[in-house]
Amino acid sequence: MSEQARRVQAQFGASAAAYVTSAGHAGGDDLEQLCAWGRARAPARVLDVATGAGHTALAFAGIARRVVAYDLTEPMLAVARGFVASQGAATVAYVAGDVEALPFADASFDVVTCRIAAHHFADVAAAVRQVQRVLRAGGSFLLQDILGHDDPEANAFVTEVERRRDPSHVRSYRAAEWKAFLRGAGLTVLDEARVAKTRHWEDWTGRTRMSAAARADLEAFVRAAPERCRAAFDFRLAGGRVESFTDRMLLLRADRD
Amino acid sequence: MIDDELKAILVCPACKGDLVFEETRIICRACRKAYPIREGIPVMLINEAEPWAPGRE
């Protein structure tokens, strides 16, 4: 397992429970869009990669006969299992493992989902190849992740903000980069959507258990950044405090050739 | 906790070969590794697997 995988386990093992109530993860237009694409495929079996607190697995439990919720971090899976069971879904199975070494036979799934997680992966190309392998021919990969910004300086700024908040954040990718990963693995993009996601600063920095000092440092870093970089993510400041910023999410449906 | 449908699709994360399911662990004979089942959850992490040899069955 990579050093990156260990960072993810340390990060999410310590803060697993906070993701159940995270508004950004619980749902919204983004999850609705993925479900609409999923429902149209009428899948029997779905794999949710990097399930986190299980919100996507739960949503797809209402669409597919069977869902497998998969995550690198065992405490996160325990939280997901408790949350999904509390919502009355009984058709979800749980498996721990690394996305770069999926423990599933070729062509096992009709749909694979991966929501707001790929920015933690050490090797996205390897992960996408594994997704392609476990999809049946014609099956759909439903991906959602934070969209990389076209302005390199703004992109570097937000990546630094993300990493200071969560050391397991690697980076987000632009749409063209995602399409290259998918095409390289034998997946063809058939649907695309973008959804804005506003992050409320207190909630966002609180979820990862940052210290008060680290939060103050991060806020100072944001205030000191060029206005252009802040504007790229619609950072809202009031009285010298950061209130929120807005990410754009990229949603893609790519089918196995 | 690991039902037949899940058993039918689970393979070794390293070699993608077939597995042998026991009460508390999942064995890949080809890789000579045993993957733990913890809290009912198969832990299919290559670095969490224990060495396994046929004589220790």
Image (spheres, rainbow, N blue to C red):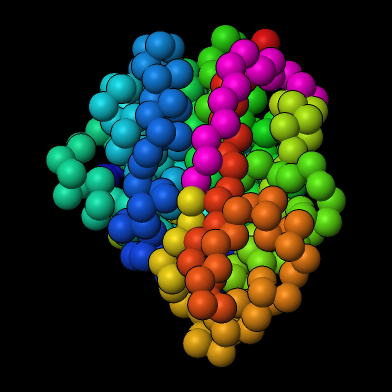
Q: Position of residue B46 (x, y in %)?
A: 61, 54
Would you say residue B22 sits in the magenta stretch? no
Outermost residue toward the front? A239
Residue toward you, B17 or A118: A118
Looking at the image, residue B28 sits to the left or right of residue A119; the answer is: left
Looking at the image, residue A233 sits to the left or right of residue A21; the answer is: right
**In which image quadrant can residue A14 be found?**
bottom left
Magenta highlight range: A183-197
Would you say residue A190 sits in the magenta stretch? yes
Residue drawn at (57%, 10%) of the image: A138
Residue drawn at (25%, 52%) of the image: A83
Q: In the rendered image, is residue A132 in sight?
A: yes
Q: Position of residue A53 (x, y in %)?
A: 37, 53
Say if A99 sits above or below A133 in the image: below
Q: Position of residue B51 (x, y in %)?
A: 59, 61
Residue drawn at (68%, 60%) of the image: A230
Quarter of the figure with the C terminus of chain A:
top right
Say if A209 sits above or below A30 in the image: below
Q: How many marks?
A: 0
Residue toward you, A231 or A89: A231
Q: Position of residue A100 (x, y in %)?
A: 66, 44
Outermost residue toward the bottom? A213
Secondary structure character of the magenta stretch overall: strand
**In which image quadrant can residue A56 be found?**
top left
Say if A176 sits above or below A69 in the image: above
Outermost residue toward the right? A152
Q: In the rendered image, is residue B50 in sight?
A: no
